[in-house]
Amino acid sequence: MEEKTQVFDAFIRKNRTFGFRTFLEEQPDREEIIVAFLIILEYMKSGKIRVSQKDLFDDILVESLVAE
């Protein structure tokens, strides 16, 4: 999970704002998707990202709050 956290950290520095679906499309299997989701929850909790969703069933917008 630590390696995946480093990958996500690099991803949010490169892509300051992105759709959750976009990030999930890069995950090769179900286990990786679950790990990615847990990392996103942890980053939300620690204040490193902000997530929003305009309407029900829309893509979730993830915004990095980490300085470059």
Image (cartoon, rainbow, N blue to C red):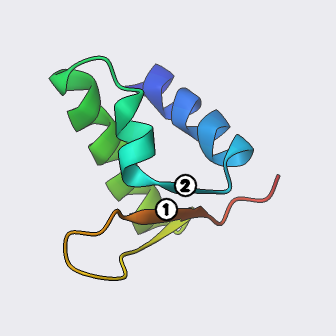
Q: Which of 26 and 12 is in front in this view?
A: 26
Label tally: 2
| Residue 24 appears left or right of 17 | left
The N terminus - image quarter: top left
Looking at the image, is mark 2 or mark 1 earlier in the sequence? 2
Q: Nearer the viewer, residue 37 or 17?
A: 17
* Vertical comparison of 17 with 36: above or below: below
Question: Mark 2 Cα within 10 Å, few/some/many (few <14, many 20+)?
Answer: some
Identify residue for label 2: 18
| Residue 58 appears left or right of 66 | left
Residue 63 image-quadrant placement: bottom right
SS type, badge 2? strand
Q: Residue 12, how many percent across, how many down?
A: 62, 47
Looking at the rendered structure, the kind of residue marked 2 is Phe
Identify residue for label 1: 62
* Vertical comparison of 39 with 46: above or below: above
- The residue under the point 29% across, 69% down is 58
Q: Which of 2 and 31 is in front in this view?
A: 31
Q: Residue 45, how many percent across, how many down?
A: 40, 66
- The residue under the point 44% across, 40% down is 23
Q: Nearer the viewer, residue 24 or 9?
A: 24
Looking at the rendered structure, the kind of residue marked 1 is Val
Question: Mark 1 Cα within 10 Å, few/some/many (few <14, many 20+)?
Answer: many
SS type, badge 1? strand
Q: Which mark is residue 42?
A: none
- The residue under the point 44% across, 43% down is 22
Q: Residue 10, how many percent across, how many down?
A: 66, 35
* Vertical comparison of 26 with 17: above or below: above
The answer to the question of whether label 2 and label 1 lie on touching residues, with beta carbons closer than 8 A, is yes
Separation (CA) of disc 2 from disc 1: 5 Å
